Image (cartoon, rainbow, N blue to C red):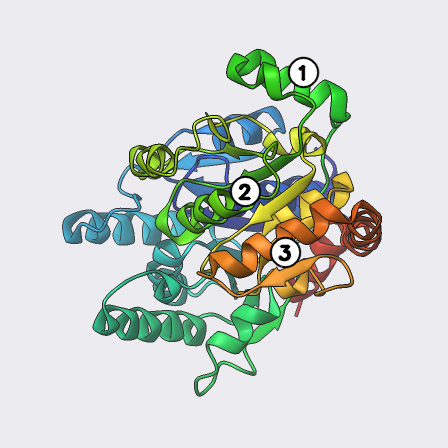
Amino acid sequence: MSEKQLYRKKVLYLITKSNWGGAQRYVYDLATTLDHHVWEPMVACGGSGTLVDMLHHAGIATITLPDLERDISLQKEWRFFWSFYRLLRTERPAVLHLNSSKASGLGALAGRLARVPQIIVTAHGWAFNEDRPRWQKLLIKILHWLTILLSHRTIAVSSGLLRQLRWPGTERKMKVINPGRTIGAMYDTTEARAELVRRHPALAQYEHDPWLGVIAELHPIKRHAVLITAVASLVRTHPTVRLICIGDGSIRTELEALVQAHNLAAHVFFLGSVVEAARFLKAFTIAVLPSKSESYGYVLHEAGLAGVPVVATAVGGIPDIIRHEVSGLLVPPDDSEYLTNALAQLLDNTTRAEQFASALQKSVSARTVALMTAATTALYQH
């Protein structure tokens, strides 16, 4: 080990889940693109999912915290807090970078008690935007606010998140840093469709039709039901359109029942989870994201890199990616009629759709992982 490496500053990342989602990719990108002559990254997380495997392959140290889970349990929260505090006292990181709502609150408090010099929180989304009773939303908002106050700096992945929590003391603590994103080798349109047909043979007879694509967890906040309702109207004027849903989740059975109720079995297809789904984006004629809440919208960034036209809801951080009628079309959430009309516009005017896709590709290509990492490490050194 060189003399320089002996004096590297340790950065400890904490994230609740070790699956492969947007927040996990963010942690992976930062940990692997830091200047390892200056920084020594390590990641603590719950479980032993894809993130852990990816980090091991990249040579990044990982620590599994068995009591760190998404579901709330006071006993486990207590055990997690003290085990994490002991970890901080042992590792003595120069920077503690917290990710995910639940881990951030307890992690920031443990970091303060352990006297970590720099505590950074990244807000990947606010839990009070989910469909909850009003009293729960208020309580969660207070907890988010306290987390920001406990941190030295809080990164918001979009300006939309910044606007949603303007309480005393937050303005001087928060900074917007849009995520960067790169995609490995992508399939071209023909290859992507052929591969998806191979995995889902029911699509074979529709391989040359217009495909709408949504890549998202099957979760109520993503509003697949609104999109399916829009498709039910769209097929009256565009009878060959097909909706391809990539992702899985708790409401799949409910959505499949909705498809049957609208008699859309030949128009809506659920493909389940697909590893590195962004590689298949060129299969789609239009990428759609109908969410009620979205902190940033990684998949729209990815669609831009793939050169695919986009229709999405004007919520959260999506307007940081899509400029309405410049790089895509934005519609109000929970409005299937607006969504139907926007999809029809792009299906009927391919020239306009291609112009939007080109503008989006140009704008998101400037948001690189390297720039995101540089802006983040500037906060580490503050």
In the rendered view, does 171 fall on the left or right side of 347? Answer: left
The percent position of residue 301, horizontal first and vertical second, equals 68, 49
Check disc 1 and report the residue beneath it: 194
In the rendered view, does 202 fall on the left or right side of 179? Answer: left
Q: Amino acid at mark 2?
A: Arg
In primary-sequence order, the first of circles 1 and 2 is: 1
Instruction: Please indicate, yes or no, whether residue 206 appears anywhere in the rendered image.
Output: yes
Labelled disc at residue 236: 2
Q: Amino acid at mark 1?
A: Ala
**Residue with the most extreme left position:** 75
Say few, some or many: other residues with alpha carbon within 10 Å of mark 1 (under 14 / 14 to 19 / 20 or more): some
Residue appearing at x 74%, y 28% in the figure: 186
Q: Amino acid at mark 3?
A: Ala
In primary-sequence order, the first of circles 2 and 3 is: 2
Instruction: Please indicate, yes or no, whether residue 94 appears anywhere in the rendered image.
Output: no
Q: Disc 2, disc 3: CB below 8 Å?
A: no
Labelled disc at residue 342: 3
The percent position of residue 110, horizontal first and vertical second, equals 35, 61
Discs 1/2, front: 2
Residue appearing at x 64%, y 65% in the figure: 319
